[in-house]
Every structure is written in C-alpha cells, then in structure tokens.
Image (spheres, rainbow, N blue to C red):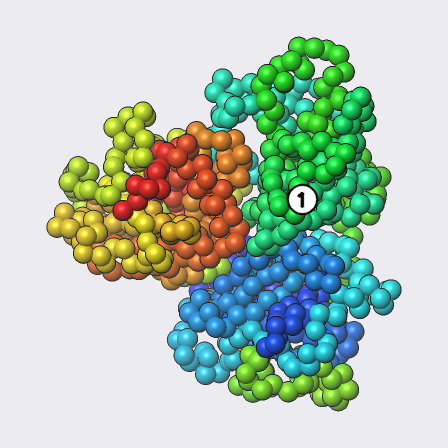
Amino acid sequence: MEAEAAPSRHKRDSSVGSVASGSPDEKRELFEFFGWVFHHGFNSIGHEYCHLRFLFIRGKHVEMYKRDPSENPDIKPIRRGVISPSLMVEELGRRKVNDNDIYVIRFYNRQDERKKGEIACATAGEAKKWMEAFDHARQQAVYELSKGGGVRDILNVETEINLEGHRPRVRRYAHELKKLIRIGQGPETLLRRSSNVGDMYFHSNAGDAIEANNWKCLRTIKGARIFEDIADSKAGKGVLVKAVAVIEASADTVFEVILNLERNRRYEWDNFSGDLELIDSYDGHYDVLYGTFEPEYPARWNSRKDFVFSRQWFHAQDGTYTIIQLPAVHKKRPSRSGYKRITVNPSIWEIRTINTPMGMGTSKCLVTQMMEIQSAKWCKWMNDHSSKFEKTVPYALLCQVSGLKKYVEANPALKTEISVAISQAKISDMSGSNSDYEDLNEADDDKFYDAMSSGSSSSEESDDEENDMKVGKVRLKNVSWAIAGMTLKKKSVADAHEELDPHVAPISINPNIFHGSLAKGKDDSDTNCWSSPSGSGFVIRGKDYLRDNSKVKGSDPLLQLIGVDWLKVEDKLDSVALGPKSLVQSEAGKKLPFILIVNLQIPAKPNYSLVCYYASDRPVNKTSLLGEFIDGTDAFRDARFKLIPSIIEGYWMVKRAVGTKACLLGKAVTCNYLRQDNFLEIDVDIGSSSVARSVIGLVLGYVTSIVVDLAILIEAKEEAELPEYILGTVRLNRLRPDSAV
C-alpha cells in the first residue's frame, strides 16, 4: 500500500499561517494525497467485495480510479465527490478477506449516518495515514465554508460524498486480493511495503501525566535490556518486568510482524509462540489465539505445553501501538492430550516511533514488552544466580524483544522504509478565484460512493467503456490548507491568557450548594466519589513549545469543578444541561457567569454517563482562546478539545492501556456541542470508536479498584496561545457502577 502526501510539516504550518491572515489573494499551497486502497463493503445480497482502487484526494475533492491516472492520462474517475464538513472517520480494525488481513476505515456523515462506506488498507500504518488525509480534506471543507456561503449553497454546486454502495456485478465480489497474488508483478508488492508519509503526522513524546514507576536495569539479553519496577507502591500482586530495545524499522512494520501468525516468519524470531492458531476474532481489534510451546530445556515429563490467550490492540493519535495479551479460556480449545495447559503471563507490547533526522533511509522505534510475574517466583529467580530463570516461560517471553530485534537486523527490507512511488506528490502554489475546478460541472458528477438503490451504471466494471470516455481539462485554483476554525484573529502574548474578563470582579462560588448524584470525597480514603486535584500531575505545552517541544507542569485549573453526575441510561443521554434537575437549571446555576459541561457517554450494558460541571467566577473573554472555543464552530472545537488521562492507582495493565498521552477527543470519537445561555455542553460519544469501546471495556472491568485523574484543556497551536493552561480536572475514586442513578 503506497500513498504520498505533498507538504512537509513546516510547509503546512506556513500555509496555515497565511490563512490566518485572511487575505483571499495570497498564494496558498495545495495538499494532495493519493495511492492504492481497497474499496470494501457488502452488496445487497450480503456478498463481500474488496476491489483494488487508486484514490486521489485533492483539497476537499476525492476521486477514485481503476488505474493510476499518472500512467493513464485519459482515464476517467469511476467515483468522485467532495468531502462534507460533517464527515467522520473511524478505524474498524483488522479483518480477514480471502485469507489476507486488511485494515478497514469507515466513513460516515455526522448529520446523516445513512451516508457511509468503507475503504481498506494492507497495513495499520497506511490506514492511519489515510484517516489523517481525510481529516485534512474535511478541514479544507470547513475552511471554505467559513469563507462564505452556507452548507446548502455549497451542496447546490457540489455533490456531497455518499460513502456507501457498490455498483452491481456480484460475480466479481472479493476477488481483488487473490488477483494481487496471482499477477506476480505490480501493485501487489505494495501489500508488503510501507509508505514514507507518516513522519509528518506522528511525533513521539513522553506521556502527558507524571507516572510513579521506578525502573532498574537488571541485565541485557541479546541487545534487549531487562528492567524491574522497584517503586515502593506496586499496582497488582506481582512484580512488573519489561524488556526494551531500539529496532531500526518503522512502528508500523514491527506491529505487523508481531501480529503476523504465519509460522515460517514467527519461527525466525519468536522462540515461545511460534506455533499460533487463530481461534476467534472480534470487532477488528481483538482476537483469541491458541499456541504450543516446547521448552529449550525440557523437564522429565509434560515438556510440551499449550496455552490460550487473547490479544487486543490500539493505535494512539501519536502513532504508538499497544497490544494487550491476557490469558484466556475458549471452548473451541480444551486441554489437549500430551500437553500441559499453562497460563501465560499478562503482558503488553508498546511500539513507539523514535524521531530520526530527515533524509535518513531508515526509521527507528522503541519496542517494550512489559509483563507481570508472581513476586515469590521472581524473588527466587533473582536471588538464585543459577540458570533457572532461563528455563522459564517469562524468560522466553522477554526474549521475544531481542528475537524481534535480531530478526529485523537480518532482513534489510524491513529495516528500510521502501517507497514504491506511484507518482510524485504535488504542491500547487496558485492564486485566483475561489472556484476549485474550472471547465467542470460538478452538479453532474457521480456521487463518490453510489448507494445500491441509485441504479448506477456498470461503468466501474467495464474497462472498454471507461477507456472510451474523455476527461475535460481540470485546473486547480486557490486551494489552501488550513486547520478548522482558523478564523481566530491574532492576539498579543499579553492578551492570550486573559481567558476570563479582567474588568469584571470575580464572584464567590460555593460548591456546597450544588449537588450532583455522585458525592464529593472528603479525603483520600473515601470511595465512589469525586474530587478536584491540582494540575501539577500533568504536563502541558510550555511557552517555547513551538521551538523546542518543551512541556511544563500544569497549574491550578482555570474553572472550578462544582459537581459530578454518575448516571445510568438505556440509550445515549444528550443535552444533559437542559434537564430540569440539572445543576445548570438550578437557581444558583443560572447565576453563574459560565458553566462548561463535559458529558462522557460510556457504552456498556446498561450505558452510563459521567457528567462534570465546571464553573467560572467571571464572564469569559470573547477574544480569548476559550471564548473562541465556546462560540466557535464544531470543527474548531473538535480540533482543539483535549483530554489527558492518568490512572493514579489501579491494575498496571489498565494503566498502560489507558496511557498518559493527551487525546484530541474530536478526532478520536464523535463530540456533539450544545451552546445556550451561560453554558456549553460537550457530549463525548465514547461508543462511536471501536478502539475507545475496547479501552473503556477494559477500564470498566476494574473501575471499582482504580483512581483516575482527568484533565481537560484547549490545545494551543500558535505562539500567541502559549503556554497552555489546564481548563479543569476531576479525580474519580473507585466508582461503583451499581451506584449510578
């Protein structure tokens, strides 16, 4: 799978700056992203199809071809359309089609979910890059909408994408992957090669919350270092141990190697789980595996062992991969005669990109495998300096990291990011009218993904007809790249953090007069309660972040947490602030200058809503970043609203799964906004993302034993907006699901 993106981060930032100036006559850069994908879906009778297609994103315009247009200049797109400002993109994870693994991306219209569709990529890394590309196209659509004209006016001229459907011809469903293997030369090589585009999107940083681990290096095994957590307070009953190594390959490549179950390949690096068999797969991010193991140092009896474990994986916004492995039981694989059934240690793989100087031919990533070992056994092994530890299953697991490192070193094709260039990406620097296309009547364009019921022609399936068609001359003009909502006027540094009106005297807020359904904790010993910690446990962007990526400790929150509701509902609960019993509708709530409501909608059986109410003691400064966020567009809010999680106490695996990295919620899940009177409500639909559903499902399993801190803030992207500040915090202490109202 190959895709090319045009501008570097530096160039894209430059174009953003030119948009902020607001001059319509300035030259702007045109962003293009193109490459091979699979058009995936199901037809009207339930048959699966997966067609190889060449996808081209130019600004907010998208075209799909059967062949590469740079090699076939007369070819006409089989589908075309424009990205809607309300487009949402979701990663559905890994699926198997014709014995090949693909990574599926779902598109849908936030305002009309009937408009939907799917494309797929050969690797998780390529899927992430296409998600970023479609997000940039959506930002372009939002920016052009902000220049003038309403949605209705735009849609009268341009055909909105309907991301659904497959043209008829059922007999050709799901054959393209087999075709790729059969043709021997050409695009099939893309399935085994990664792109060199992702560096400009993903940047590896340390976590954004302060952790309490204290790691000590104990020994090295073939290039991998073994650490033990010697912190005084250990979460869990065992000792945390990890193996760490730097591997000269991209994080995408290493992730694919770890997930690959092909026996011949695993035999080259994995001395423990080389023989793996897929038992079951769920939701694109979760599977159950059966494996066998014959120790290098066999015992006198039952030397052959077997095991069952589950794998669950996530891909964070910064490009980090996390793979959780837990022992499991499955009815399809009972105990096997001649084998001793063992329980594998709970473990987590983390694969994090290491930034390398531009121009280097290789990528690097930091690979960590962390596991829990019973304290008694670990102490016995460490105190006994014989070779007993080398004969154990935990040792075999830790050796996987060093085996992976040696495997990549022995395969140069994995070490170097090979780019199979289809054509050169372009940056057009043009000026002129606001029309993106000339000599082209977009009202006559086909919808990008035609619905099955639309009775579309079979032109997609007919090469001869397609070759007979001629394409009108297309000239791109005045397409600019900008992040959503970049209509902010420039502010001086002195005014940047006057978020609340300095000319109004602050009022006194008594939190005791506000009563949410969840009680406020009196001290750290209280459970099933909330409190508001300081921001010192989080790190945020400092004043010089744009120059040196430096982060600083947070300070006290700008807004005061006055109450928390812990609610149990049948369906998603939106617009909580409009409820008659809401804190916002109380007499005291109506007198507050401003209230920010964050409603975390948690998918479960039943569903839950965790609602936090933050109040200001003065009116919000309309010209501040907070003021722009409150009264700005949904797209601007999506691009700026950030949450930092930190599990203070709890099972170590839940800590690692949740992580401490800041997350732009609007890019990860669907956020809906309600702005009225003196409040802004943000409804965060965690169930809108399969990855978020998986993480929250793991957290709910341990929720009664964990203490979690959350910080919310608005991401600063310009010099005048730095340093960042904590908007609000909340600490949730061992919540009980049965206490929800």
Residue identified by numbered label 1:
333
Q: Nearer the viewer, residue 672 or 736?
A: 736
Q: Can you give x and y, in whole percent of width and height, for residue 129 in the image?
A: 62, 56
Residue type, numbered disc 1 = Arg
Q: Can you give x and y, in whole percent of width and height, for residue 722 in the image?
A: 42, 43
Q: Is residue 226 left or right of residue 467?
A: left
Residue 272 location, quadrant: top right
Residue farthest along the left direction in this orientation: 587
| Residue 373 in sight from this viewpoint | yes
Q: Which secondary structure lies at badge 1?
A: loop
Badge 1 density bin: few <14, some 14–19, many ≥20, Cα 10 Å:
few
**Across the whole image, how many numbered discs are drawn on residues?**
1
Q: Is residue 173 left or right of residue 530?
A: right
Q: Which residue occupies 39% across, 35% down?
A: 704
Residue 404 location, quadrant: top right
Q: Nearer the viewer, residue 740 or 158?
A: 740
Q: In the rendered view, would you say 473 is above or below 412?
A: below
